[in-house]
Image (cartoon, rainbow, N blue to C red):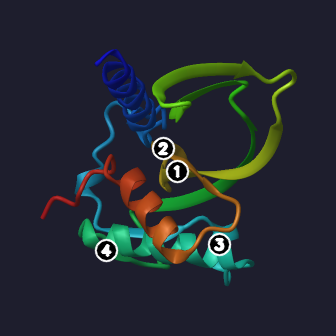
Amino acid sequence: MPIRRLLFVAALFTVVGCATSNQPKAESTTATGSDIPASATFGWVDEFSAAPSSILDNQISNALRNEFTKKGYVESSAAPDIVISYETIEIEKVKESNPVRIGIGVGSWGGSSGGSVGSSVDVGGDEEVLLQNQLVVRALDPNTDQEVWIGTSTTFDEHPGDAVINTTVAELMQGFPARRR
Protein backbone atom coordinates (compact mmCIF):
# COMPACT_ATOMS: atom_id res chain seq x y z
CA MET A 1 0.00 0.00 0.00
CA PRO A 2 2.76 2.58 0.72
CA ILE A 3 4.20 2.04 -2.79
CA ARG A 4 0.86 2.90 -4.38
CA ARG A 5 0.65 6.08 -2.36
CA LEU A 6 4.19 6.98 -3.33
CA LEU A 7 3.44 6.39 -7.00
CA PHE A 8 0.25 8.46 -6.70
CA VAL A 9 2.08 11.37 -5.05
CA ALA A 10 4.84 11.27 -7.67
CA ALA A 11 2.27 11.26 -10.49
CA LEU A 12 0.40 14.12 -8.87
CA PHE A 13 3.55 16.26 -8.64
CA THR A 14 4.30 15.51 -12.28
CA VAL A 15 0.82 16.58 -13.42
CA VAL A 16 0.84 19.76 -11.32
CA GLY A 17 4.34 20.66 -12.52
CA CYS A 18 3.31 20.31 -16.16
CA ALA A 19 0.04 22.18 -15.72
CA THR A 20 1.46 25.38 -14.29
CA SER A 21 2.57 28.02 -16.74
CA ASN A 22 4.51 31.18 -16.24
CA GLN A 23 3.86 32.35 -19.81
CA PRO A 24 3.34 36.12 -19.79
CA LYS A 25 0.16 37.56 -21.26
CA ALA A 26 -0.19 40.19 -23.95
CA GLU A 27 -0.41 43.70 -22.47
CA SER A 28 -1.66 47.03 -23.73
CA THR A 29 -2.06 50.59 -22.52
CA THR A 30 -4.28 53.39 -23.77
CA ALA A 31 -3.20 56.99 -23.28
CA THR A 32 -5.27 58.96 -20.80
CA GLY A 33 -7.75 61.25 -22.54
CA SER A 34 -7.54 59.54 -25.94
CA ASP A 35 -10.78 58.65 -27.70
CA ILE A 36 -9.70 55.89 -30.05
CA PRO A 37 -13.25 54.51 -30.60
CA ALA A 38 -14.21 57.84 -32.23
CA SER A 39 -11.73 57.09 -35.03
CA ALA A 40 -13.00 55.51 -38.23
CA THR A 41 -9.88 54.87 -40.28
CA PHE A 42 -6.38 53.54 -39.78
CA GLY A 43 -3.23 53.76 -41.84
CA TRP A 44 0.41 52.81 -41.54
CA VAL A 45 3.41 54.87 -40.52
CA ASP A 46 5.30 55.79 -43.72
CA GLU A 47 8.04 53.22 -43.23
CA PHE A 48 5.44 50.44 -43.22
CA SER A 49 3.31 51.73 -46.10
CA ALA A 50 5.59 50.15 -48.70
CA ALA A 51 5.40 46.45 -49.49
CA PRO A 52 6.52 44.32 -46.52
CA SER A 53 10.17 43.39 -46.69
CA SER A 54 9.99 39.93 -45.13
CA ILE A 55 7.62 37.01 -44.75
CA LEU A 56 7.22 37.83 -41.05
CA ASP A 57 6.35 41.49 -41.86
CA ASN A 58 3.76 40.29 -44.36
CA GLN A 59 2.24 37.88 -41.82
CA ILE A 60 2.09 40.56 -39.12
CA SER A 61 0.66 43.33 -41.31
CA ASN A 62 -2.02 40.98 -42.69
CA ALA A 63 -2.98 39.83 -39.18
CA LEU A 64 -3.10 43.44 -37.91
CA ARG A 65 -5.17 44.54 -40.92
CA ASN A 66 -7.61 41.70 -40.20
CA GLU A 67 -7.92 42.62 -36.49
CA PHE A 68 -8.46 46.35 -37.16
CA THR A 69 -11.15 45.47 -39.71
CA LYS A 70 -12.86 43.16 -37.19
CA LYS A 71 -12.94 46.07 -34.72
CA GLY A 72 -14.73 48.26 -37.28
CA TYR A 73 -11.87 50.37 -38.63
CA VAL A 74 -11.34 50.97 -42.35
CA GLU A 75 -7.87 51.13 -43.87
CA SER A 76 -7.08 54.46 -45.50
CA SER A 77 -3.91 55.88 -46.99
CA ALA A 78 -5.33 59.42 -47.21
CA ALA A 79 -5.43 61.17 -43.81
CA PRO A 80 -6.20 58.21 -41.51
CA ASP A 81 -7.55 58.94 -38.01
CA ILE A 82 -4.94 56.70 -36.38
CA VAL A 83 -1.58 55.55 -37.72
CA ILE A 84 -0.16 52.13 -36.88
CA SER A 85 3.44 51.03 -36.52
CA TYR A 86 4.89 47.80 -35.28
CA GLU A 87 8.22 46.23 -34.58
CA THR A 88 9.48 42.82 -33.64
CA ILE A 89 12.06 42.53 -30.90
CA GLU A 90 14.36 39.52 -30.90
CA ILE A 91 14.78 37.99 -27.45
CA GLU A 92 17.26 35.33 -26.41
CA LYS A 93 15.85 32.85 -23.92
CA VAL A 94 18.08 30.39 -22.16
CA LYS A 95 16.42 27.04 -21.63
CA GLU A 96 18.11 25.08 -18.90
CA SER A 97 17.57 21.41 -18.33
CA ASN A 98 16.36 20.48 -14.89
CA PRO A 99 19.41 19.30 -12.94
CA VAL A 100 17.30 17.24 -10.52
CA ARG A 101 15.73 14.02 -11.73
CA ILE A 102 13.45 11.69 -9.84
CA GLY A 103 12.88 8.11 -10.88
CA ILE A 104 10.35 5.60 -9.61
CA GLY A 105 10.66 1.87 -10.08
CA VAL A 106 8.73 -1.24 -9.18
CA GLY A 107 10.06 -4.74 -9.62
CA SER A 108 10.69 -8.11 -8.12
CA TRP A 109 13.73 -10.17 -7.45
CA GLY A 110 13.95 -13.61 -5.95
CA GLY A 111 10.23 -14.00 -5.33
CA SER A 112 9.76 -10.78 -3.42
CA SER A 113 8.32 -7.56 -4.72
CA GLY A 114 9.65 -4.15 -3.99
CA GLY A 115 9.81 -0.57 -5.06
CA SER A 116 12.22 2.27 -4.94
CA VAL A 117 12.50 5.98 -5.50
CA GLY A 118 15.77 7.44 -6.61
CA SER A 119 17.04 10.87 -7.40
CA SER A 120 20.06 12.25 -9.13
CA VAL A 121 21.53 15.68 -9.58
CA ASP A 122 23.28 16.66 -12.79
CA VAL A 123 26.36 18.73 -12.36
CA GLY A 124 26.28 21.72 -14.74
CA GLY A 125 22.85 21.31 -16.37
CA ASP A 126 22.61 21.75 -20.14
CA GLU A 127 21.70 25.14 -21.58
CA GLU A 128 20.09 25.88 -24.92
CA VAL A 129 19.69 29.41 -26.31
CA LEU A 130 16.38 29.95 -28.07
CA LEU A 131 15.68 32.97 -30.24
CA GLN A 132 12.15 34.29 -29.89
CA ASN A 133 10.30 37.38 -31.04
CA GLN A 134 8.01 39.79 -29.30
CA LEU A 135 5.66 42.09 -31.19
CA VAL A 136 5.10 45.72 -30.19
CA VAL A 137 2.26 47.63 -31.90
CA ARG A 138 1.74 51.38 -31.54
CA ALA A 139 -1.23 53.54 -32.54
CA LEU A 140 -0.46 57.22 -33.07
CA ASP A 141 -2.67 60.27 -33.46
CA PRO A 142 -1.36 61.82 -36.72
CA ASN A 143 -2.64 65.29 -35.77
CA THR A 144 -0.72 65.50 -32.48
CA ASP A 145 2.01 62.96 -33.29
CA GLN A 146 1.29 61.37 -29.90
CA GLU A 147 1.13 57.69 -29.05
CA VAL A 148 -2.45 56.83 -28.02
CA TRP A 149 -2.10 53.07 -27.59
CA ILE A 150 0.67 50.50 -27.25
CA GLY A 151 0.41 46.73 -27.13
CA THR A 152 3.06 44.12 -26.44
CA SER A 153 2.62 40.47 -27.35
CA THR A 154 3.77 37.30 -25.72
CA THR A 155 6.90 35.77 -27.23
CA PHE A 156 6.74 33.49 -30.25
CA ASP A 157 9.25 31.34 -32.11
CA GLU A 158 11.80 32.80 -34.46
CA HIS A 159 10.09 31.36 -37.58
CA PRO A 160 6.35 31.21 -36.78
CA GLY A 161 3.59 30.07 -39.08
CA ASP A 162 0.51 32.11 -40.01
CA ALA A 163 -1.58 30.46 -37.26
CA VAL A 164 0.89 31.52 -34.53
CA ILE A 165 1.05 35.10 -35.83
CA ASN A 166 -2.75 35.33 -36.15
CA THR A 167 -3.21 34.07 -32.58
CA THR A 168 -0.46 36.33 -31.21
CA VAL A 169 -1.88 39.43 -32.92
CA ALA A 170 -5.46 38.57 -31.88
CA GLU A 171 -4.38 38.27 -28.22
CA LEU A 172 -2.44 41.54 -28.42
CA MET A 173 -5.35 43.37 -30.06
CA GLN A 174 -7.86 42.33 -27.38
CA GLY A 175 -6.81 45.47 -25.54
CA PHE A 176 -7.45 47.77 -28.53
CA PRO A 177 -10.88 49.44 -28.33
CA ALA A 178 -13.46 48.71 -31.02
CA ARG A 179 -14.76 51.55 -33.17
CA ARG A 180 -17.81 53.40 -31.88
CA ARG A 181 -20.47 53.54 -34.58
Q: Which of disc 1 and disc 3 is earlier in sequence?
A: 3
Amino acid at the residue labelled 4: Thr
Describe residue 93's horizontal placement relative to residue 5 as left or right: right
Tag nearer the camera, 2 or 3: 3
Q: Position of residue 63 (x, y in %)?
A: 46, 72
Q: Residue at label 2? A: 150
Alpha-carbon span between mark 2 and mark 3:
18 Å
Under circle 1, the secondary element is strand
Alpha-carbon span between mark 1 and mark 2:
5 Å
Alpha-carbon span between mark 4 and mark 2:
18 Å
Alpha-carbon span between mark 4 and mark 1:
16 Å
Foreground residue among 88 and 16: 16
Label annotation for residue 138: 1
Residue occupying image coordinates x 48% and y 31%: 111
Label annotation for residue 9: none
Q: Which quarter of the figure is the C terminus placed in? A: bottom left
Q: Which of disc 2 and disc 4 is earlier in sequence?
A: 4
Under circle 3, the secondary element is helix
Q: Residue at label 3? A: 57
